[in-house]
Amino acid sequence: MTETSAPIYLSVERAIEFIGDANGVLSLLNTLHQTLGEDLPRIAALLEQDDMHGVNRVLHQLKGFTPVFCVDSLVELVVIVEQMSKHAEISEVRAAYSQLAPQLEALRNEVASHLVSHPQA
């Protein structure tokens, strides 16, 4: 028997409050899942290249959706790392992102699970 655990980082209730309807949320969750799938490897590659401007650009975009879909603790961490990417040493940003990345990957997995259990009509 498979038991689905409650999401830690995804807040569908918050998304419905922002967006207004479940179908709109599902549509945007599809976009979010695709974006995370592309952006997480992109950030890692940009960090490897010491491209802080690129890291900041991608994190800034992620920062835009987190208040809609995520719990406060993840929103705060995304904001902190995005701000750090503007002025901190690359080693500090790498360390901070190493804490953030697993949470964003967990969010991506939670989104995938939600989409599987709530297919759009």
Image: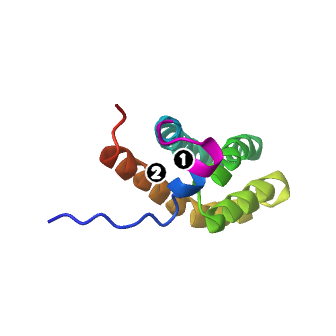
Q: Is residue 2 visible?
A: yes
The chosen color scheme is: rainbow
Q: Looking at the magenta stretch, what is its main secondary structure?
A: helix
Residue at image point 68% right, 64% down: 77
Q: Which residue is mark 2?
A: 108
Q: Is residue 91 visible?
A: no
Which amino acid type is shown beneath numbered disc 2? Arg
Q: Quadrant of the N terminus?
A: bottom left
| Side (left or right) of 36 relative to 87 | left
46 magenta-colored: no
The answer to whether mark 2 and mark 1 are in CB contact below 8 A is yes
- CA separation, marks 2 and 1? 10 Å
> SS of the residue at dot 2?
helix
Q: Residues within 10 Å of mark 2 (few under 14, many from 20)?
A: many
| Residue closest to the far right | 87
Image coordinates of residue 98 in percent, x first then y, are: 58, 63
Of residues 105 and 7, the one drawn nearer to the viewer in this rendering: 7
Q: Residues within 10 Å of mark 1 (few under 14, many from 20)?
A: some
Q: Tell me where the magenta segment starts and ends, as one range.
A: 16-23
17 magenta-colored: yes
Name the image quarter holding residue 71. bottom right
Which amino acid type is shown beneath numbered disc 1? Leu
Image coordinates of residue 75 in percent, x first then y, are: 67, 60
Name the image quarter holding residue 81. bottom right
| Side (left or right) of 108 relative to 115 | right
Above-or-below relation of 29 to 14: above
Q: Which residue is mark 1?
A: 40
> SS of the residue at dot 1?
helix
